[in-house]
Image (cartoon, rainbow, N blue to C red):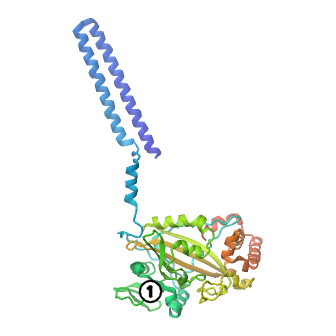
Protein backbone atom coordinates (compact mmCIF):
# COMPACT_ATOMS: atom_id res chain seq x y z
CA UNK A 1 0.00 0.00 0.00
CA UNK A 2 2.80 2.42 0.94
CA UNK A 3 4.72 1.70 -2.29
CA UNK A 4 1.58 2.34 -4.35
CA UNK A 5 1.07 5.72 -2.66
CA UNK A 6 4.73 6.57 -3.18
CA UNK A 7 4.52 5.85 -6.91
CA UNK A 8 1.34 7.89 -7.20
CA UNK A 9 2.97 10.82 -5.39
CA UNK A 10 5.95 10.74 -7.75
CA UNK A 11 3.66 10.79 -10.78
CA UNK A 12 1.81 13.79 -9.42
CA UNK A 13 5.10 15.62 -8.81
CA UNK A 14 6.23 14.82 -12.37
CA UNK A 15 3.01 16.16 -13.80
CA UNK A 16 3.29 19.33 -11.70
CA UNK A 17 6.86 19.91 -12.84
CA UNK A 18 5.88 19.36 -16.49
CA UNK A 19 3.07 21.86 -16.16
CA UNK A 20 5.32 24.45 -14.50
CA UNK A 21 7.97 23.99 -17.18
CA UNK A 22 5.41 24.40 -19.92
CA UNK A 23 4.10 27.54 -18.21
CA UNK A 24 7.58 29.03 -17.96
CA UNK A 25 8.31 28.27 -21.61
CA UNK A 26 5.00 29.78 -22.59
CA UNK A 27 5.68 32.92 -20.55
CA UNK A 28 9.14 33.30 -22.08
CA UNK A 29 7.82 32.88 -25.58
CA UNK A 30 5.01 35.34 -24.92
CA UNK A 31 7.46 37.90 -23.54
CA UNK A 32 9.64 37.62 -26.63
CA UNK A 33 6.67 37.68 -28.99
CA UNK A 34 5.18 40.70 -27.24
CA UNK A 35 8.52 42.54 -27.42
CA UNK A 36 8.75 41.83 -31.12
CA UNK A 37 5.13 42.91 -31.58
CA UNK A 38 5.80 46.21 -29.84
CA UNK A 39 8.38 47.09 -32.49
CA UNK A 40 6.55 45.53 -35.44
CA UNK A 41 3.16 47.15 -35.44
CA UNK A 42 -0.47 46.09 -35.15
CA UNK A 43 -0.35 42.99 -37.38
CA UNK A 44 2.59 41.51 -35.48
CA UNK A 45 0.81 42.16 -32.21
CA UNK A 46 -2.30 40.30 -33.38
CA UNK A 47 -0.20 37.36 -34.51
CA UNK A 48 1.56 37.23 -31.15
CA UNK A 49 -1.70 37.19 -29.26
CA UNK A 50 -2.86 34.27 -31.40
CA UNK A 51 0.37 32.40 -30.69
CA UNK A 52 -0.12 33.07 -26.97
CA UNK A 53 -3.59 31.59 -27.01
CA UNK A 54 -2.43 28.49 -28.88
CA UNK A 55 0.39 27.91 -26.41
CA UNK A 56 -1.95 28.23 -23.44
CA UNK A 57 -4.46 25.80 -24.94
CA UNK A 58 -1.70 23.31 -25.81
CA UNK A 59 -0.20 23.41 -22.33
CA UNK A 60 -3.58 22.99 -20.69
CA UNK A 61 -4.43 20.08 -22.96
CA UNK A 62 -1.12 18.33 -22.19
CA UNK A 63 -1.71 18.80 -18.46
CA UNK A 64 -5.23 17.33 -18.60
CA UNK A 65 -4.08 14.32 -20.64
CA UNK A 66 -1.21 13.66 -18.22
CA UNK A 67 -3.50 13.86 -15.20
CA UNK A 68 -5.95 11.44 -16.75
CA UNK A 69 -3.15 8.93 -17.27
CA UNK A 70 -2.06 9.33 -13.66
CA UNK A 71 -5.61 8.88 -12.42
CA UNK A 72 -5.93 5.72 -14.48
CA UNK A 73 -2.84 4.21 -12.87
CA UNK A 74 -2.82 5.59 -9.34
CA UNK A 75 -6.33 6.45 -8.20
CA UNK A 76 -8.02 4.07 -5.71
CA UNK A 77 -11.07 2.19 -6.97
CA UNK A 78 -14.22 4.25 -6.62
CA UNK A 79 -16.35 3.55 -3.59
CA UNK A 80 -19.45 1.74 -4.87
CA UNK A 81 -22.72 3.54 -4.63
CA UNK A 82 -25.38 2.08 -2.40
CA UNK A 83 -27.25 0.33 -5.26
CA UNK A 84 -23.95 -1.05 -6.59
CA UNK A 85 -22.92 -2.30 -3.16
CA UNK A 86 -26.28 -3.98 -2.58
CA UNK A 87 -25.99 -5.70 -5.95
CA UNK A 88 -22.50 -6.97 -5.09
CA UNK A 89 -23.67 -8.32 -1.74
CA UNK A 90 -26.67 -10.02 -3.28
CA UNK A 91 -24.49 -11.69 -5.86
CA UNK A 92 -22.37 -13.14 -3.03
CA UNK A 93 -25.31 -14.12 -0.85
CA UNK A 94 -26.58 -17.71 -0.85
CA UNK A 95 -30.17 -18.63 -0.29
CA UNK A 96 -30.40 -20.53 3.02
CA UNK A 97 -30.73 -24.26 2.58
CA UNK A 98 -29.43 -24.26 -0.99
CA UNK A 99 -25.91 -25.10 -2.06
CA UNK A 100 -24.29 -24.86 -5.47
CA UNK A 101 -21.68 -27.63 -5.75
CA UNK A 102 -18.10 -26.40 -5.74
CA UNK A 103 -15.39 -27.76 -8.04
CA UNK A 104 -12.87 -27.67 -5.18
CA UNK A 105 -10.98 -30.91 -4.64
CA UNK A 106 -9.03 -31.52 -1.47
CA UNK A 107 -5.31 -31.75 -2.30
CA UNK A 108 -3.81 -35.21 -2.15
CA UNK A 109 -1.82 -35.36 1.10
CA UNK A 110 1.76 -36.46 1.43
CA UNK A 111 2.27 -39.64 3.47
CA UNK A 112 2.53 -39.00 7.20
CA UNK A 113 6.28 -39.04 7.96
CA UNK A 114 7.46 -42.43 9.27
CA UNK A 115 3.97 -43.38 10.43
CA UNK A 116 3.71 -46.70 12.25
CA UNK A 117 0.78 -48.36 13.97
CA UNK A 118 3.22 -49.59 16.61
CA UNK A 119 5.43 -46.54 17.18
CA UNK A 120 3.63 -43.31 16.23
CA UNK A 121 2.55 -41.81 19.54
CA UNK A 122 -0.51 -39.56 19.99
CA UNK A 123 0.24 -35.87 19.60
CA UNK A 124 0.59 -34.29 23.07
CA UNK A 125 -2.29 -31.82 22.99
CA UNK A 126 -2.44 -29.88 26.25
CA UNK A 127 -4.89 -27.08 25.36
CA UNK A 128 -5.01 -25.16 28.61
CA UNK A 129 -3.55 -21.80 29.58
CA UNK A 130 -2.40 -20.15 32.78
CA UNK A 131 -4.97 -18.20 34.79
CA UNK A 132 -6.12 -16.07 36.40
CA UNK A 133 -8.72 -15.59 33.65
CA UNK A 134 -10.46 -18.31 31.67
CA UNK A 135 -11.71 -17.03 28.32
CA UNK A 136 -14.67 -18.68 26.62
CA UNK A 137 -13.97 -18.53 22.87
CA UNK A 138 -14.39 -20.67 19.77
CA UNK A 139 -10.59 -20.98 19.66
CA UNK A 140 -10.39 -21.74 15.94
CA UNK A 141 -7.14 -21.97 14.01
CA UNK A 142 -6.46 -22.82 10.39
CA UNK A 143 -4.97 -26.21 9.56
CA UNK A 144 -3.63 -27.78 6.40
CA UNK A 145 -5.82 -30.26 4.54
CA UNK A 146 -3.04 -32.84 4.87
CA UNK A 147 -3.58 -32.79 8.67
CA UNK A 148 -7.29 -33.54 8.49
CA UNK A 149 -7.23 -36.97 10.20
CA UNK A 150 -4.74 -37.98 12.89
CA UNK A 151 -4.03 -41.66 13.50
CA UNK A 152 -1.48 -43.11 15.93
CA UNK A 153 -0.55 -46.23 17.88
CA UNK A 154 -3.78 -46.00 19.91
CA UNK A 155 -5.61 -46.98 16.72
CA UNK A 156 -6.04 -50.67 17.69
CA UNK A 157 -7.85 -49.76 20.91
CA UNK A 158 -10.09 -47.21 19.19
CA UNK A 159 -10.84 -49.63 16.37
CA UNK A 160 -11.79 -52.40 18.80
CA UNK A 161 -13.93 -50.09 20.96
CA UNK A 162 -15.78 -48.80 17.91
CA UNK A 163 -16.39 -52.29 16.50
CA UNK A 164 -17.74 -53.45 19.86
CA UNK A 165 -20.07 -50.47 20.23
CA UNK A 166 -21.34 -50.74 16.67
CA UNK A 167 -22.18 -54.36 17.40
CA UNK A 168 -23.84 -53.58 20.73
CA UNK A 169 -25.61 -50.29 20.02
CA UNK A 170 -25.03 -49.29 16.40
CA UNK A 171 -28.37 -47.53 15.66
CA UNK A 172 -28.08 -45.48 18.85
CA UNK A 173 -24.63 -44.22 17.89
CA UNK A 174 -24.69 -44.06 14.09
CA UNK A 175 -27.46 -42.53 12.01
CA UNK A 176 -28.02 -40.64 8.76
CA UNK A 177 -31.17 -38.68 7.90
CA UNK A 178 -32.37 -38.89 4.27
CA UNK A 179 -31.52 -35.24 3.57
CA UNK A 180 -27.98 -35.83 4.85
CA UNK A 181 -27.37 -39.08 2.96
CA UNK A 182 -25.53 -37.44 0.00
CA UNK A 183 -23.23 -35.64 2.44
CA UNK A 184 -22.53 -38.86 4.36
CA UNK A 185 -21.64 -40.67 1.13
CA UNK A 186 -19.44 -37.75 0.09
CA UNK A 187 -17.62 -37.94 3.43
CA UNK A 188 -17.06 -41.66 2.88
CA UNK A 189 -15.63 -40.94 -0.58
CA UNK A 190 -13.36 -38.21 0.78
CA UNK A 191 -11.96 -40.52 3.47
CA UNK A 192 -11.47 -43.27 0.90
CA UNK A 193 -9.29 -40.92 -1.16
CA UNK A 194 -7.47 -39.35 1.77
CA UNK A 195 -6.54 -42.26 4.04
CA UNK A 196 -4.53 -44.46 1.60
CA UNK A 197 -2.55 -41.39 0.53
CA UNK A 198 -1.85 -40.18 4.08
CA UNK A 199 -1.39 -43.60 5.75
CA UNK A 200 -0.25 -45.98 2.97
CA UNK A 201 1.04 -48.58 5.44
CA UNK A 202 -2.47 -48.91 6.91
CA UNK A 203 -4.83 -48.39 3.96
CA UNK A 204 -4.70 -49.41 0.31
CA UNK A 205 -6.97 -47.96 -2.39
CA UNK A 206 -8.96 -50.50 -4.42
CA UNK A 207 -11.25 -50.29 -7.45
CA UNK A 208 -14.33 -50.29 -5.19
CA UNK A 209 -13.02 -48.58 -2.06
CA UNK A 210 -10.14 -49.42 0.22
CA UNK A 211 -8.57 -52.21 2.28
CA UNK A 212 -7.38 -52.02 5.88
CA UNK A 213 -3.98 -53.73 5.72
CA UNK A 214 -3.80 -54.13 9.52
CA UNK A 215 -7.27 -55.54 10.25
CA UNK A 216 -7.89 -57.29 6.91
CA UNK A 217 -11.19 -55.44 6.38
CA UNK A 218 -12.30 -54.44 2.88
CA UNK A 219 -14.68 -51.55 2.28
CA UNK A 220 -16.90 -51.36 -0.81
CA UNK A 221 -18.18 -47.81 -1.28
CA UNK A 222 -19.46 -48.36 -4.83
CA UNK A 223 -22.22 -50.95 -4.43
CA UNK A 224 -25.77 -49.74 -3.88
CA UNK A 225 -27.22 -50.07 -1.42
CA UNK A 226 -24.14 -49.65 0.72
CA UNK A 227 -23.38 -52.56 3.08
CA UNK A 228 -24.19 -50.36 6.09
CA UNK A 229 -24.96 -46.80 7.06
CA UNK A 230 -22.32 -44.57 5.41
CA UNK A 231 -21.52 -42.82 8.70
CA UNK A 232 -20.99 -46.18 10.34
CA UNK A 233 -18.59 -47.14 7.55
CA UNK A 234 -16.72 -43.86 8.07
CA UNK A 235 -16.49 -44.57 11.80
CA UNK A 236 -14.68 -47.85 11.18
CA UNK A 237 -11.94 -46.05 9.23
CA UNK A 238 -10.74 -43.42 11.74
CA UNK A 239 -10.25 -42.84 15.45
CA UNK A 240 -12.54 -39.78 15.36
CA UNK A 241 -16.21 -39.47 16.08
CA UNK A 242 -17.97 -37.78 13.15
CA UNK A 243 -20.94 -35.45 12.69
CA UNK A 244 -22.43 -33.64 9.69
CA UNK A 245 -24.44 -30.44 10.00
CA UNK A 246 -26.90 -29.63 7.20
CA UNK A 247 -28.31 -26.17 6.57
CA UNK A 248 -32.09 -25.93 6.23
CA UNK A 249 -34.14 -23.12 4.63
CA UNK A 250 -34.42 -21.37 8.00
CA UNK A 251 -30.65 -20.75 7.86
CA UNK A 252 -29.95 -23.02 10.84
CA UNK A 253 -27.54 -25.97 10.77
CA UNK A 254 -28.92 -29.28 12.01
CA UNK A 255 -27.14 -32.43 13.17
CA UNK A 256 -28.53 -34.89 10.62
CA UNK A 257 -25.74 -37.45 10.32
CA UNK A 258 -23.41 -38.80 12.96
CA UNK A 259 -21.19 -41.62 14.16
CA UNK A 260 -20.70 -40.78 17.83
CA UNK A 261 -19.23 -43.85 19.50
CA UNK A 262 -16.57 -42.55 21.92
CA UNK A 263 -17.96 -39.23 23.10
CA UNK A 264 -17.72 -39.96 26.83
CA UNK A 265 -20.27 -37.41 28.03
CA UNK A 266 -23.04 -37.12 25.41
CA UNK A 267 -25.22 -39.36 23.24
CA UNK A 268 -26.12 -38.93 19.60
CA UNK A 269 -29.72 -39.90 20.34
CA UNK A 270 -30.07 -36.79 22.54
CA UNK A 271 -28.75 -34.33 19.93
CA UNK A 272 -29.80 -35.91 16.64
CA UNK A 273 -31.94 -33.56 14.56
CA UNK A 274 -31.20 -30.51 16.74
CA UNK A 275 -30.04 -27.16 15.37
CA UNK A 276 -26.56 -26.00 16.30
CA UNK A 277 -27.67 -23.57 19.00
CA UNK A 278 -29.92 -26.06 20.75
CA UNK A 279 -27.16 -28.67 20.79
CA UNK A 280 -25.08 -26.28 22.88
CA UNK A 281 -27.79 -24.77 25.06
CA UNK A 282 -29.24 -28.20 25.88
CA UNK A 283 -25.78 -29.19 27.05
CA UNK A 284 -25.44 -26.07 29.23
CA UNK A 285 -22.29 -24.93 27.43
CA UNK A 286 -21.08 -21.93 29.49
CA UNK A 287 -21.68 -18.47 28.02
CA UNK A 288 -22.82 -19.89 24.68
CA UNK A 289 -25.58 -17.33 24.18
CA UNK A 290 -23.49 -14.38 25.31
CA UNK A 291 -20.14 -15.14 23.63
CA UNK A 292 -20.38 -17.98 21.15
CA UNK A 293 -23.73 -18.29 19.40
CA UNK A 294 -23.59 -15.38 16.96
CA UNK A 295 -19.99 -15.94 15.96
CA UNK A 296 -20.52 -19.66 15.49
CA UNK A 297 -23.58 -19.22 13.27
CA UNK A 298 -21.80 -16.63 11.14
CA UNK A 299 -18.78 -18.90 10.86
CA UNK A 300 -20.88 -21.82 9.62
CA UNK A 301 -22.55 -19.68 6.98
CA UNK A 302 -19.25 -18.29 5.68
CA UNK A 303 -17.20 -21.49 5.75
CA UNK A 304 -15.83 -22.37 2.30
CA UNK A 305 -14.74 -25.80 1.00
CA UNK A 306 -11.20 -24.46 0.58
CA UNK A 307 -10.94 -23.76 4.31
CA UNK A 308 -10.33 -26.09 7.23
CA UNK A 309 -10.12 -25.15 10.89
CA UNK A 310 -9.44 -26.94 14.13
CA UNK A 311 -10.02 -26.34 17.81
CA UNK A 312 -9.14 -28.17 21.02
CA UNK A 313 -10.82 -28.57 24.39
CA UNK A 314 -10.20 -30.54 27.55
CA UNK A 315 -12.08 -32.20 30.41
CA UNK A 316 -11.37 -34.31 33.45
CA UNK A 317 -12.88 -37.74 33.91
CA UNK A 318 -12.90 -39.88 37.06
CA UNK A 319 -13.14 -43.30 35.43
CA UNK A 320 -11.17 -45.08 32.73
CA UNK A 321 -13.86 -45.69 30.08
CA UNK A 322 -13.04 -43.96 26.80
CA UNK A 323 -16.45 -44.61 25.25
CA UNK A 324 -18.75 -43.60 28.08
CA UNK A 325 -17.92 -41.99 31.43
CA UNK A 326 -20.10 -44.17 33.62
CA UNK A 327 -19.29 -42.03 36.66
CA UNK A 328 -21.84 -39.40 35.49
CA UNK A 329 -24.61 -41.99 35.17
CA UNK A 330 -25.61 -44.99 33.04
CA UNK A 331 -25.50 -44.50 29.28
CA UNK A 332 -28.97 -45.99 28.80
CA UNK A 333 -30.68 -43.86 31.41
CA UNK A 334 -34.14 -42.68 30.40
CA UNK A 335 -34.36 -38.99 29.62
CA UNK A 336 -31.43 -36.79 30.52
CA UNK A 337 -28.17 -38.16 31.86
CA UNK A 338 -27.86 -37.64 35.61
CA UNK A 339 -24.65 -35.62 35.32
CA UNK A 340 -21.64 -34.83 37.46
CA UNK A 341 -23.65 -34.62 40.67
CA UNK A 342 -23.87 -38.43 40.68
CA UNK A 343 -20.12 -38.94 40.40
CA UNK A 344 -18.22 -40.17 43.42
CA UNK A 345 -16.53 -37.22 45.10
CA UNK A 346 -12.78 -37.03 45.63
CA UNK A 347 -11.82 -40.32 44.04
CA UNK A 348 -8.12 -41.02 44.29
CA UNK A 349 -6.00 -39.43 41.58
CA UNK A 350 -5.30 -42.91 40.20
CA UNK A 351 -8.83 -42.72 38.73
CA UNK A 352 -8.41 -39.27 37.17
CA UNK A 353 -8.07 -39.07 33.39
CA UNK A 354 -7.22 -36.15 31.16
CA UNK A 355 -9.59 -36.08 28.21
CA UNK A 356 -8.89 -33.73 25.29
CA UNK A 357 -10.63 -33.35 21.94
CA UNK A 358 -9.18 -32.12 18.68
CA UNK A 359 -12.08 -31.08 16.45
CA UNK A 360 -11.83 -30.11 12.78
CA UNK A 361 -14.49 -28.43 10.67
CA UNK A 362 -14.71 -28.31 6.89
CA UNK A 363 -17.41 -27.94 4.28
CA UNK A 364 -17.96 -30.75 1.80
CA UNK A 365 -17.73 -29.24 -1.71
CA UNK A 366 -20.48 -31.22 -3.43
CA UNK A 367 -23.21 -31.37 -0.80
CA UNK A 368 -22.30 -28.31 1.26
CA UNK A 369 -22.58 -30.23 4.53
CA UNK A 370 -20.26 -29.15 7.35
CA UNK A 371 -18.25 -32.04 8.80
CA UNK A 372 -17.06 -32.23 12.40
CA UNK A 373 -14.30 -34.68 13.20
CA UNK A 374 -13.90 -35.21 16.95
CA UNK A 375 -10.71 -37.01 17.91
CA UNK A 376 -10.37 -37.81 21.62
CA UNK A 377 -7.02 -38.07 23.40
CA UNK A 378 -7.32 -39.96 26.68
CA UNK A 379 -4.52 -40.29 29.24
CA UNK A 380 -4.17 -40.87 32.99
CA UNK A 381 -3.60 -37.57 34.77
CA UNK A 382 -0.60 -39.11 36.53
CA UNK A 383 1.07 -39.68 33.15
CA UNK A 384 0.34 -36.19 31.86
CA UNK A 385 1.66 -34.61 35.05
CA UNK A 386 5.09 -36.13 34.45
CA UNK A 387 5.60 -33.80 31.49
CA UNK A 388 7.62 -30.66 32.11
CA UNK A 389 5.58 -27.53 32.88
CA UNK A 390 2.23 -29.34 32.57
CA UNK A 391 1.17 -29.77 36.24
CA UNK A 392 1.74 -26.10 37.11
CA UNK A 393 -0.04 -24.81 34.03
CA UNK A 394 -2.94 -27.27 34.39
CA UNK A 395 -3.41 -26.37 38.07
CA UNK A 396 -3.50 -22.68 37.17
CA UNK A 397 -6.01 -23.34 34.39
CA UNK A 398 -8.34 -25.34 36.65
CA UNK A 399 -8.24 -22.59 39.26
CA UNK A 400 -9.16 -20.03 36.58
CA UNK A 401 -12.51 -21.65 35.82
CA UNK A 402 -15.47 -19.51 36.77
CA UNK A 403 -18.46 -20.98 38.57
CA UNK A 404 -20.27 -21.79 35.31
CA UNK A 405 -17.27 -23.53 33.75
CA UNK A 406 -16.57 -25.37 37.01
CA UNK A 407 -20.13 -26.73 37.07
CA UNK A 408 -19.91 -27.74 33.43
CA UNK A 409 -16.62 -29.59 33.93
CA UNK A 410 -17.60 -31.14 37.27
CA UNK A 411 -14.78 -29.54 39.27
CA UNK A 412 -16.59 -29.89 42.60
CA UNK A 413 -16.35 -33.70 42.39
CA UNK A 414 -12.58 -33.96 41.88
CA UNK A 415 -11.01 -30.50 42.23
CA UNK A 416 -9.49 -30.83 45.68
CA UNK A 417 -7.73 -34.12 44.97
CA UNK A 418 -6.59 -33.06 41.51
CA UNK A 419 -5.17 -29.69 42.57
CA UNK A 420 -3.33 -31.14 45.56
CA UNK A 421 -1.66 -33.66 43.26
CA UNK A 422 -0.81 -31.13 40.53
CA UNK A 423 0.65 -28.66 43.02
CA UNK A 424 2.89 -31.37 44.46
CA UNK A 425 4.14 -32.40 41.01
CA UNK A 426 4.80 -28.77 40.08
CA UNK A 427 6.83 -28.25 43.25
CA UNK A 428 8.87 -31.35 42.44
CA UNK A 429 9.67 -30.03 38.97
CA UNK A 430 10.76 -26.65 40.32
CA UNK A 431 12.87 -28.33 43.01
CA UNK A 432 14.80 -30.35 40.43
CA UNK A 433 15.67 -27.16 38.58
CA UNK A 434 13.03 -26.77 35.87
CA UNK A 435 13.50 -23.32 34.30
CA UNK A 436 10.00 -21.84 34.22
CA UNK A 437 11.15 -18.93 32.07
CA UNK A 438 11.80 -21.28 29.14
CA UNK A 439 8.33 -22.80 28.95
CA UNK A 440 7.29 -20.85 25.86
CA UNK A 441 10.35 -22.18 24.04
CA UNK A 442 9.44 -25.76 24.89
CA UNK A 443 5.64 -25.90 24.77
CA UNK A 444 3.46 -23.65 22.62
CA UNK A 445 -0.35 -23.83 22.70
CA UNK A 446 -2.11 -26.20 22.13
CA UNK A 447 0.71 -28.52 23.22
Q: Quarter of the image for the C terminus: give it.
A: bottom right
Q: Residue at x 60, y 83 (%)?
A: 264
Q: How many marks?
A: 1
- Toward the viewer: 372 or 421? 372
Report which quarter residue 288 is drawn in: bottom right
Residue extending farthest to the left is 43
Q: Quadrant of residue 17?
A: top left
Whole-percent x and y of residue 262?
A: 56, 84
> Disc 1 marks which residue?
233
Q: Nearer the viewer, residue 223 or 174?
A: 174
Check the image and report above or below for 223 versus 429.
below
Image check: 39 left or right of 197? left
Q: Position of residue 281 (x, y in %)?
A: 58, 73
**Residue at screen point 39% across, 58% down:** 90
Left or right of residue 125: residue 191: left
Of residues 1 and 199, which is closer to you in this image? 1
- How many residues crowd around disc 1 within 10 Å: few (fewer than 14), some, or many (20 or more)? many
Above or below — where is 233 with respect to 359?
below
Residue 137: in sight, yes or no? Answer: no
For the point 67% across and 66% down, the residue is 134
Left or right: residue 196 versus residue 336 is left
- Residue at the (50%, 64%) spot, across then down: 298
Relative image position of residue 377 (x, y in whole percent): 59, 79
Q: Secondary structure at mark 1?
A: helix
Q: Is residue 373 visible?
A: yes
In the rendered image, the vertical position of residue 171 relative to residue 29, given as above or below: below
Vertical comparison of 366 with 206: above or below: above
Q: x, y percentage for residue 182?
A: 38, 79
Amino acid sequence: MESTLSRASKRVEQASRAFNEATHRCASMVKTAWSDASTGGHHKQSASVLILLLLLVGSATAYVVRRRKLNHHAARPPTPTTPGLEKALKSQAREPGKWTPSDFQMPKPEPYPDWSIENTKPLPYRPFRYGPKYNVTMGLRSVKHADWIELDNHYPRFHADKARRIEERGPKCCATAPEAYPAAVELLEELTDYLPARYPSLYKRTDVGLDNLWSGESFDIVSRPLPEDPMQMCARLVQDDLAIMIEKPDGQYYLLAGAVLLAGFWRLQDKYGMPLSEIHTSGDVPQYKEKLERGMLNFFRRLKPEEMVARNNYFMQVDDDLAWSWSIGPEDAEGEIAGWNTAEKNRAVDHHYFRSERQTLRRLPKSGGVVFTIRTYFHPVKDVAEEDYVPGRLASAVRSWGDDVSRYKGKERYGDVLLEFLDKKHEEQVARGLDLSREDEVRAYPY
